[in-house]
Image (cartoon, rainbow, N blue to C red):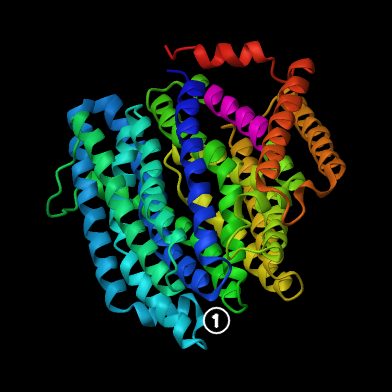
């Protein structure tokens, strides 16, 4: 299967997952709104996610996928399975230790994580309570991510990409009755937290079933240090530091946001919206590209590795640039249609849309990081991206502190976007300097045309919103608003792809042929 078809499989399922996620978030906004309770829930939910990205999706995948892919090429399935067993045994021990420590010392940890909540005892206690319920979610998600890494390295992407859909379905099943009931907000947050934990268990069960069918279930045993495991940790420790730096970026935003009421919930809702294109494009491409590059480089296929990265770069910008432009042009209509109901009011829509615009500015950069980092990780270089992540952290901290006083939620989002662009410039410059990847003159012209087409499409969408007048005003008939937004999305996409076809940036026939092409 070609890189494009793998991306289509992962991206398509991610799209379905994000659609269900929007339904979940809309229901969440309706039952919790922008309130102290929603701040407590979002802080509690972010905490296990921070560790999940650090231990599982970050360090583990970065170090493990190149080694496992290389073992598949050189040692076969049984050798790769044995390597996975030895490495995953260490992951399980690490997860158990961290989970136990957090459950025991949650109040003390939350003082550091959300210092702004300390002055509100009720809000702080609720955050601690919800964190203790949801933190075991880390164990489920970490094991799921490890199993997914094995499946992805084998070219099996469907089960891991489908798993988040299961989480959203479980959450929706809990939120629908909660939206119809009249429970107190803290009690509602408790049941949502329980549903999140159950969704994590369901995700793990699905991916375990898939890896068992593949005959690649690792054997968990008492961990031992051998040369290959030691080599894994040599790669993983810098990746843990890099992942830690990335998560400190999130941590800094959380700490600053905790100092002002409702800012955390504003950031959370805006973050969820720009995560849709990021998940479909950036995460899907990164998921497919890292094992693809690792296999090519392990087998000495340098030309194929360069072609894979070139295709990924073009596809990521071809899709992420118009997505960012559309989010900027349609920010307020999108937030109003998706979230404005129940406890979520018109003023909340304005605040979330402002943060969304600031995040959208950085969307192409967030995607490019996913495309460029595998160029280092597949060559077993985890140190260089760690240094660049540290530089972006400094940029993010300085800008967040400088902008928060005047711009509040917009300042935090904008600082995150600027830091992402700094990271992209550093990654691209060093890949080019080492001769691992450079863009041709034709590729530069393609990127310039993509930017121009995005500006034309965004201008057309913004002008159409102005012409529609009161359709997107608060309180307007919701079905009309939803249909108008859907029509705008379809028209914008049609205009962009038509312009891409006419200008030969990407003839549609060529794109379809790429999707049908099988990897030899």
Judge whether 337 appears above or below 48 on screen: above
Residue for badge 1: 116
The percent position of residue 366, horizontal first and vertical second, equals 60, 46
The percent position of residue 515, horizontal first and vertical second, equals 53, 17
The percent position of residue 86, horizontal first and vertical second, equals 19, 46
Tell me the magenta residue range.
306-320
The image quadrant that residue 465 belongs to is: top right
- Between 453 and 233, the residue placed more toward the observer is 453
- Whether residue 508 sits left or right of residue 244 in the image: it is right
In the image, residue 317 lies in the stretch drawn in magenta: yes
Judge whether 140 appears above or below 109 on screen: above
Most common SS among magenta residues: helix
- Between 471 and 477, the residue placed more toward the observer is 477
- Quadrant of the frame with the N terminus: top left
Mark 1 crowdedness (10 Å alpha carbons): few <14, some 14-19, many ≥20: some
- Whether residue 108 sits left or right of residue 25 in the image: it is left
Residue at image point 45% right, 33% down:
13
The percent position of residue 361, horizontal first and vertical second, equals 71, 49
Residue at image point 34% right, 28% down:
156
Q: Secondary structure at mark 1?
A: helix
In the image, residue 254 lies in the stretch drawn in magenta: no
């Amino acid at each position: 299967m070609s890189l494009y078809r793998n991306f289509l499989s992962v991206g398509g399922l991610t799209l379905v997952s994000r659609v269900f996620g929007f339904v979940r978030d809309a229901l969440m906004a309706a039952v919790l709104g922008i309130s102290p309770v929603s701040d407590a829930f979002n802080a509690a939910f972010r905490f296990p996610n921070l560790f999940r990205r650090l231990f599982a999706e970050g360090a583990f995948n970065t170090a493990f996928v190149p080694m496992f892919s290389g073992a598949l090429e050189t040692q076969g399935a049984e050798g790769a399975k044995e390597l996975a067993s030895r490495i995953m045994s260490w992951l399980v021990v690490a997860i158990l230790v961290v989970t136990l420590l957090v459950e025991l010392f949650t109040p003390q940890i939350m003082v550091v994580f959300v210092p702004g909540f300390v002055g509100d005892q009720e809000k702080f206690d609720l955050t601690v309570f919800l964190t203790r319920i949801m933190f075991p979610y880390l164990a489920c998600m970490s094991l799921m991510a490890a199993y997914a890494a094995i499946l992805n390295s084998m070219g099996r992407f469907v089960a891991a990409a489908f798993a988040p859909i299961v989480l959203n379905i479980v959450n929706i099943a809990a939120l629908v009755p909660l939206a119809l009931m009249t429970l107190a907000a803290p009690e509602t947050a408790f049941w949502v937290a329980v549903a999140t934990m159950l969704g994590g268990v369901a995700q793990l069960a699905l991916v375990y079933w898939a890896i068992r069918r593949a005959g690649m279930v690792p054997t968990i045993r008492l961990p031992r240090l051998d040369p290959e495991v030691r080599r894994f940790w040599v790669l993983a420790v810098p990746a843990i530091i890099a992942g830690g730096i990335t998560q400190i970026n999130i941590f800094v935003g959380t700490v600053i946001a905790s100092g002002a009421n409702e800012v955390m919930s504003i950031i959370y809702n805006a973050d969820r919206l720009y995560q849709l294109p990021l998940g479909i494009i950036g995460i899907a491409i990164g998921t497919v590209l890292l094992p693809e590059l690792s296999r090519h480089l392990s087998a000495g296929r340098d030309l194929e590795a360069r072609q894979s990265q070139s295709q990924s770069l073009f596809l990521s910008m071809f899709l992420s640039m118009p997505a960012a432009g559309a989010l900027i042009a349609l920010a307020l209509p999108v937030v109003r249609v998706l979230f404005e109901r129940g406890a979520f009011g018109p003023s909340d829509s304005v605040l979330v849309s402002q943060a969304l615009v600031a995040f959208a500015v950085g969307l192409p950069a967030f995607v490019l990081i996913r495309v460029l980092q595998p160029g280092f990780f597949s060559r077993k270089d985890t140190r260089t991206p760690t240094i660049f992540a540290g530089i972006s952290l400094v940029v993010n901290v300085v800008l967040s502190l400088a902008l928060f006083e005047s711009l509040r939620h917009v300042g935090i989002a904008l600082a995150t976007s600027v830091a992402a662009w700094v990271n992209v410039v550093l990654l691209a410059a060093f890949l080019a300097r080492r001769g691992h990847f450079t863009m041709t003159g034709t590729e530069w012209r393609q990127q310039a045309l993509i930017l121009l087409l995005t500006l034309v499409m965004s201008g057309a969408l913004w002008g159409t919103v102005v012409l529609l007048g009161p359709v997107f005003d608060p309180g307007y008939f919701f079905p009309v608003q939803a249909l108008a937004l859907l029509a705008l999305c379809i028209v914008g996409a049609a205009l962009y792809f038509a312009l891409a076809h006419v200008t030969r940036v990407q003839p549609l026939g060529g794109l379809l042929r790429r999707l049908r092409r099988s990897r030899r």
